[in-house]
Amino acid sequence: RASKSGKCTAGKHHVFLNEVLRQLVGRKFLLLLDSWKTQADLTKFRAVFPNQDSQLLIFPEGSTGYIQPQDISLFRSWRFIHEKIEHYVRINHTEMTISDRQYFIHIHSLIHDQLSAPQF
């Protein structure tokens, strides 16, 4: 049921709330979400969890770097290395299909290996 684009649509988010999250939480819980419009809709949240004593906390737009510091440090390095590899593949016309699932598995394995090196 994963989206092919990797983006969370309103329908996919509803499926997540209804079929995944509902199974995992008790009557009382707190859900922390980023301010993406797809997932920050309180009416959709209340439609799935109408009678539960639950809360939805939405982080303000632009605050991710302060709340999730790895988005600034670790993932910034990750994205930088990933972009360099993709540029290399495109410039040198390497025989790889960038949209292929196996490509992403190999690339992220390579990046993980590089960032696990002692100099990082």
Image (cartoon, rainbow, N blue to C red):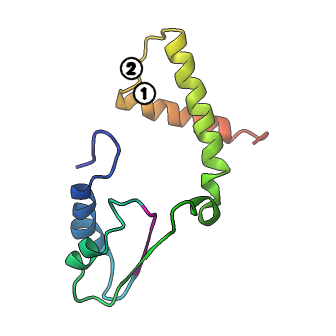
Kind of residue at disc 2: Thr
> Which image quadrant is residue 46 in?
bottom left
Specify whether residue 9 is painted magenta. no
> Which image quadrant is residue 65 in?
bottom right
In this figure, which residue is indicated by the disc labeled 1? 103
The correct choice, above or below, for 37 with respect to 59 in the image is above
Magenta: main secondary structure equals: strand
Rendering coords of residue 1 (x, y %): 22, 49
Whether residue 74 sits left or right of residue 91 in the image: it is right
Whether residue 120 sits left or right of residue 71 in the image: it is right
Give the position of the C terminus as an image quadrant.
top right
Whether residue 30 sits left or right of residue 19 in the image: it is right
The residue nearer to you, when weighing 87 against 106, is 87
Residue plotted at (43% across, 11% down): 95
Kind of residue at disc 1: Tyr
Rendering coords of residue 16 (x, y %): 27, 63
Q: Estimate how packed mark 2 is, as few (under 14), some (14 to 19) or many (20 or more) residues with alpha carbons within 10 Å.
A: few
Instruction: For mark 1, give the secondary structure.
Output: helix
Q: What stretch is highlighted in magenta?
A: 30-35
In this figure, which residue is indicated by the disc labeled 2? 97
